[in-house]
Image: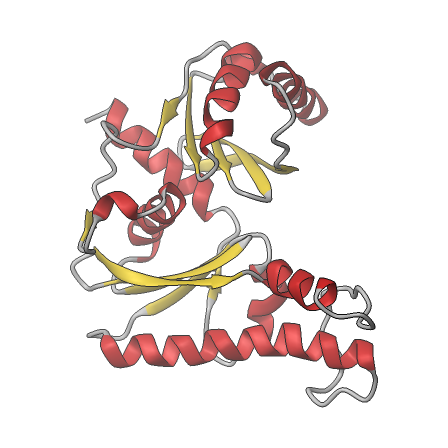
Amino acid sequence: MILAIDIGNSHIEAGLMDGDRLVMSERISTDHKKTATEYAVLLHTIFEIRGIDPTAVSGAIISSVVPPLTFVLKNAVKMAVGVTPMVVGPGVKNGLRIRIDDPRQLGADMVVGAVGAIRIYGAPLILIDMGTATTISSIDSSGDFRGGVIIPGVNVSLEALVSGTSQLPRISLSAPGSAIGTNTVHSMQSGIVYGQASMLDGMIDRFREEMEGDPKVIATGGLAKVIVPYCRHEITLDNELMIKGLKIIYDRNVHS
């Protein structure tokens, strides 16, 4: 089995792949203060709860947008399962042709998501990843990464709204019964949920105007399941896309 870990600004996703089959997927909070040993204990506990023998892990791969934690998690994986993980970055083949001004600027998370989406869903594609930031990527019919947008994420937007005002309360991320709110909480929920859904619908329209063919729309990320159901466009939700993409990159480097 292959252990795949995606380190994000808010959460770390850890998954186990047995061939093409996802055996396990867990999300834990990103904590800059944790040591490698503490993360190793956390990983070992997850294996124990899931009834998985750590010695069954034969390889590992990490992608990260949090550089200070990359080395920490790399050591944690060594301690927890006894293998040295591959880290997505320079020297690791991903097979993605990146057609932007400076390919080095493309985050590892966007690379991994694109690789997974192309293999699973084909191209052209519009790929939405909803985490701390919401990113939308354009992949053309040849499978080339053409660019995208970076937008403040759902929780970032909500936190800015609440912390920047004196009277607005903290709310749950649930959709009210109507777009027009009749009280403060419902008005905020409508603004966040329906507003984000409308933003995605509008950006999909703009992307399609600039892309050739009829791109499929795929969404992933921890908050996608909250917003995507209220979009009017047809969007395929794939919460395990990052783990699958990491496994594809691992295989490309080990078996090529």
Query: As drawn, is 128 to the left or to the right of 47?
Result: left
How many marks on residues?
0
Q: Residue at x 37, y 27 (%)?
A: 87
Query: As drawn, is 195 to the left or to the right of 251?
Result: right
Q: Residue at x 64, y 18 (%)?
A: 44
For residue 113, above or below residue 151:
above
The answer to whether one can see residue 105 in this image is yes
Horizontal and vertical percent for residue 187?
A: 75, 81
Q: Residue at x 34, y 32 (%)?
A: 88
Q: Residue at x 41, y 14 (%)?
A: 84
For residue 254, above or below residue 13:
above
Q: Which image quarter is the C terminus in? A: top left
**Quadrant in the picture for residue 140:** bottom left
**Quadrant in the picture for residue 209:** bottom left
Residues 111 and 55: in front is 111
For residue 167, above or below residue 71:
below
Query: As drawn, is 100 to the left or to the right of 199?
Result: left
Query: As drawn, is 169 to the left or to the right of 70?
Result: right
Residues 33 and 93: in front is 33
The answer to whether one can see residue 3 in this image is no
Horizontal and vertical percent for residue 73?
A: 52, 23
Colour scheme shown: secondary structure
